[in-house]
Image (spheres, coloured by chain):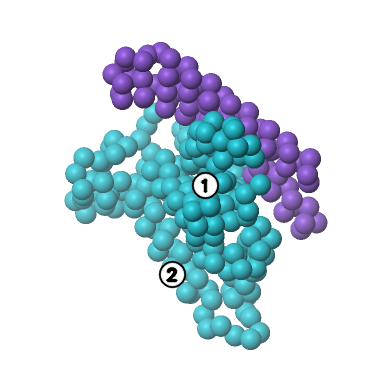
Amino acid sequence: MADDRREMFRQLAVYSQAGMSFVFSILIGFGMGWALDNKVFDGKTAPYLTFIFLGLGIGAGFKGLWELTRKIKDG
Amino acid sequence: MEHPILFISLILQALGLPVPHTPVGATMLEKICEPYMTYTWMVMAFLIIVPRLTMGKLEMVPGSGQNFWEVMVGGLMDFCSENLGEKGAKMLFPMMATFFFYIIIANMIGLIPGFMSPTSSLNITLAMTIIVWVTHHVLGFRYHGLHYYKHFMGPNKWLAPFMFLLEVISNFARLISLSMRLFGNILAKEVLLGVLFMLAGAFFAPLPILCLGVLVSVIQAVVFVLLSLLYCAGAMEHAH
């Protein structure tokens, strides 16, 4: 019983984090690109870096999900 | 929305100290008198005084007070060593146990009318998350030296620069999602309780939310500590 509950908490922690990390990865990617475009390069490179970093953010989000699936598969 | 009634703020105001009505005060004194600061100090005082009073002298055959703390601390120690192994658990146990007790008391205190949860302020949760985040990277460098960078490079040599950027982004996402989850859950509980008290407090409308609040408080404390442990364990193990 105690083991079951511990396992439940563990899974709750891991999976409740999965969705949020996905969203925040995308937001942070976008934010980094936007900051580079508008603050560092003063809009000279806009909007290309924003799009590149948005893509990286989406990639990071999916990478997190992918690693989670590997973790489930390996047990 | 009406301003909530907070006992400590009322007492401080009666003493003539400036309690800010905005989320962040302007002067140093106002910053110190913000509700989340004063209630943090209250939780700290609680955590120092109550174990002193209940535990008494340590005895071979524990009384009820000592028994309670032994169960709590022993359970936490098991919890840590399950995720980190014996040695790592001994090293990180003081920090994680402090986080656990602080968060659980801070969450629960908001259920009492007239008190607020310090964890419903992003300043507190972000501060705790930054501590965890820095600690797990420091641990990584301590265990692997400069080879820690391999954690960020992924399995493939050609994809390494690309993977490095992805890892940096997902590391920052950790920082934000860990703080935001605790903050969001507790703030939601506080606001919901406040609104229900205001609308139909006489008809016991907040009662179901109070029950849920107890559940959320415990779960969020456990989840925060567990995720910190998992991050630390991830930094300590070998790169794939």
What is the drawing colour of chain A?
purple
Q: Mark 1 points at which residue?
A: B149
Amino acid type, callout 1: Tyr
Label 1 resides on the chain identified as B
Q: Mark 2 points at which residue?
A: B49
**Residue A3 occupies quadrant:** bottom right
Viewed as shown, does residue B233 lie left or right of B54?
Answer: right
Residue at left 63%, top 81%? Answer: B62
Residue at left 38%, top 43%? Answer: B123
Label 2 resides on the chain identified as B
Q: Can you say whether B105 is above or below A16 in the image? A: below
Residue B11 locus on image (x, y percent):
29, 53
Which of A70/A41 is in front? Answer: A41
Q: Earlier in the sequence, mark 2 or mark 1?
A: 2
Residue A5 locus on image (x, y percent):
74, 52
Residue at left 31%, top 21%? Answer: A41
Residue B197 locus on image (x, y percent):
49, 36
Which of B114/B108 is in front? Answer: B108
Q: Can you say whether B76 is above or below B12 in the image? A: below
Between the residue at mark 2 and the residue at mark 1, the CA separation in whole angstroms equals 44 Å
Q: Is residue B205 visible?
A: no
Q: Which SS class for mark 1?
A: helix
Residue at left 43%, top 58%? Answer: B43
Task: Identify the chain drawn in cyan.
Answer: B
Amino acid type, callout 2: Ile
Of the 4 image quadrants, the one containing the N terminus of chain B is top left
Q: How crowded is mark 2: few (under 14 residues within 10 Å), some or many (20 or more)?
A: few
